[in-house]
Image: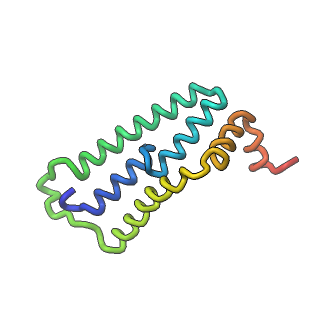
């Protein structure tokens, strides 16, 4: 990560968010899905969601290891950090991942968990309304 510290750090934040590690925003979306599955008594779905998160984390950590923490091959010695505007964009997106995760703690049950479990409990009724309209 010595050649591209900003790219490496922001990639690490993005990887952790996608994998669902707290306090990043991806954690809450995965947690909401898992809790909704448990509340709807769909334990198999909850298991597969947890397994998918674990496998996602493993795959992204492997990418991070080889891209930023592994031994640099000879042909990549001239690699440089990206231009300033790309760095700015990556930092802003990484901050959104962190801030979004921290802000979702407030009132999570009524705003996110209950509607998610209601959708699972009522089957596809919600999706039918959204895609076909109320009949």
Q: Nearer the viewer, residue 57 or 100?
A: 100
What's the image's color scheme? rainbow
**Which image quadrant for residue 80?**
bottom left
* Residue furthest left as drawn: 74
Please give the name of the residue rendered at 24% of the width and 61% of the height, measured from the top-left corner: 5
| Residue 62 location (% of width, % of height) | 29, 42
Query: What's the residue at 31%, 43% (across, down)?
Result: 61
Q: Residue at x 35, y 44 (%)?
A: 60
Q: Residue at x 38, y 49 (%)?
A: 15
Q: Residue furthest bottom?
A: 84
Q: Position of residue 18 (x, y in %)?
A: 44, 47
Q: Is residue 55 above or below residue 17?
A: above
Residue 101 at x, y percent in the picture: 48, 53
Quarter of the image that includes the N terminus: bottom left
Residue sitting nearer the eye, 112 or 125: 112
Q: Nearer the viewer, residue 21 or 87?
A: 21
Residue 52 pos. (x, y %): 46, 35
Question: Tag count in the figure?
Answer: 0
Is residue 46 toward the left or the right of residue 62 in the image?
A: right
* Horizontal arrangement in the rendering, residue 99 relative to residue 7 (left or right): right
As drawn, the residue found furthest toward the front would be 106
Question: Above or below — where is 42 with respect to 70?
Answer: above
| Depicted 43 relative to depicted 116: above or below | above
């Amino acid at each position: 990560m010595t050649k591209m510290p900003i790219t490496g750090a922001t990639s690490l934040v993005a990887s952790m968010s996608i994998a669902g590690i707290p306090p990043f925003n991806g954690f809450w979306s995965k947690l909401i899905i898992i809790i909704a599955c448990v509340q709807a008594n769909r334990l198999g779905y909850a298991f597969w969601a947890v397994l998918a998160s674990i496998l996602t984390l493993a795959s992204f950590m492997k990418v991070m290891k080889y891209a930023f923490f592994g031994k640099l091959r000879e042909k990549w010695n001239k690699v440089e950090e990206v231009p300033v505007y790309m760095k700015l964009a990556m930092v802003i997106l990484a901050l959104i991942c962190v801030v979004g995760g921290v802000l979702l703690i407030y009132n999570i049950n009524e705003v996110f968990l209950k509607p998610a479990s209601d959708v699972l409990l009522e089957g596809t009724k919600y999706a039918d309304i959204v895609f076909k309209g109320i009949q």
